[in-house]
Amino acid sequence: MAKYNNCIAMAFGKLNLTLDIVGRTAEGYHELETVMQSVSLFDSLDIQINNTDEHKIICGKAGFPCDSSNLIWKAADAFEKFTGLKTGGVTVSVDKRLPSMAGMAGGSADCAAMLCALDAMFDTNLKRSQLCEIGVTLGADVPFCIAGGTQLCKGVGEIMTPLWQPRCAFVVVKPDVSISTPEAFRKYDSLQQVPHCNTQAFIHQLKEGNIKAMCAEMFNALEFAAQEKQIQQAKNDLLGAGALGSLMTGSGSAVFGVFEDPNKAQTALEKIKKDYAQAWICEPATSGTQIIKLG
């Protein structure tokens, strides 16, 4: 039985400040080495125990799946299986702000927030490692979205090492193109030669707090597979607006620019949003999820 019948949780998006593909796991998955950063752009989940033994997802955003294919729904089922508890059915109202098919882990962030919310509502006091154990079965980015902050992620993304948070602001734009993650990896696999990231050089500059030098080390192997003119144009537009560096995040198609001065980031946003219907300013976040109400 739930200790709390209602919870509101924030699900923060992420950016890949570096993303390198360094091999394959024994199971055939791509082995990653990536520095991920939680950002202040978020979805909001309002979760209610409905006592119908059925889940229901409500969202006004066109194209958002509200059935059992949604990671929110899968998270509720996985929580029940892991803990042996019955939720009694949940109704989840989603305020969707994170863009879809953008490389910002929108679905994974919602999944992570749902797991953390149910842990709080049922007072199960699961360790972060246990939440991540559930999460990785649902998606490679879910463990990071549970941990949040700034992390070096290896394996398929589940092996995490905390890093220093950069002092900067981000302007994020989503060009009018969507990229399928499986298709991006398939295209990457078809490439003959792809450069690799000097991840340790990036981490060194991050530790030193040298944002300009850090930007020079940013890298995303999947940009070579994207082959979309809109991606390069977005990068050029952000650099033209004053960004110290610009990169596609994840498998795309969102692109971000890095600014040391938040005021310059705001000026850049005002300039660039004339050409992009989807554009945001955000800052580094210290967590992947946040519970803002229990009742």
Image (cartoon, rainbow, N blue to C red):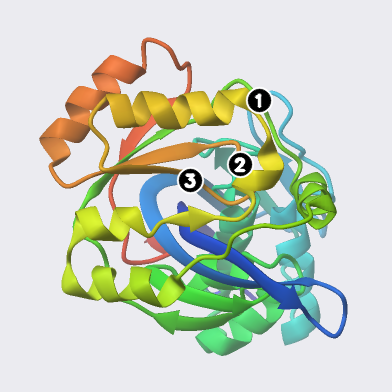
Q: Amino acid at mark 2?
A: Gly
Name the element at disc 1.
loop
Residue 290: x and y, percent? Answer: 40, 62
Secondary structure at badge 2 equals: loop
Q: Which mark is residue 61?
A: none
Q: Are marks 2 and 1 in contact (CB under 8 Å)?
A: yes
Question: Which image quarter holds the N terminus?
Answer: bottom right
Q: Are marks 3 and 2 in contact (CB under 8 Å)?
A: no
Q: Which residue is mark 3?
A: 44
The residues tagged by marks 3 and 2 sit, at their Cα atoms, a distance apart of 22 Å
Reading the image, the residue beneath label 2 is: 252
Q: Which mark is residue 177?
A: 1
Circle 3 SS class: strand
Report the residue at 59% width, 78% height from top. 154
Q: Label 2 to label 1, Cα distance in Å?
A: 9 Å
Location of residue 271 in the rendering, given as x and y in whole percent from the top left corner = 27, 16
**Closer to the N terminus: mark 3 or mark 2?**
3
Q: Residues within 10 Å of mark 3 (few under 14, many from 20)?
A: many
From the image, state whether disc 3 or disc 2 is nearer to you: 2
> Position of 19 compared to 167: left or right?
right
Q: Residue at x 37, y 68 (%)?
A: 149
Please, what is the three-letter code of the amino acid marked with disc 1? Val
Residue 204 spot, x, y in % from top left:
28, 76
- The three-letter code of the residue at mark 3 reads Ser
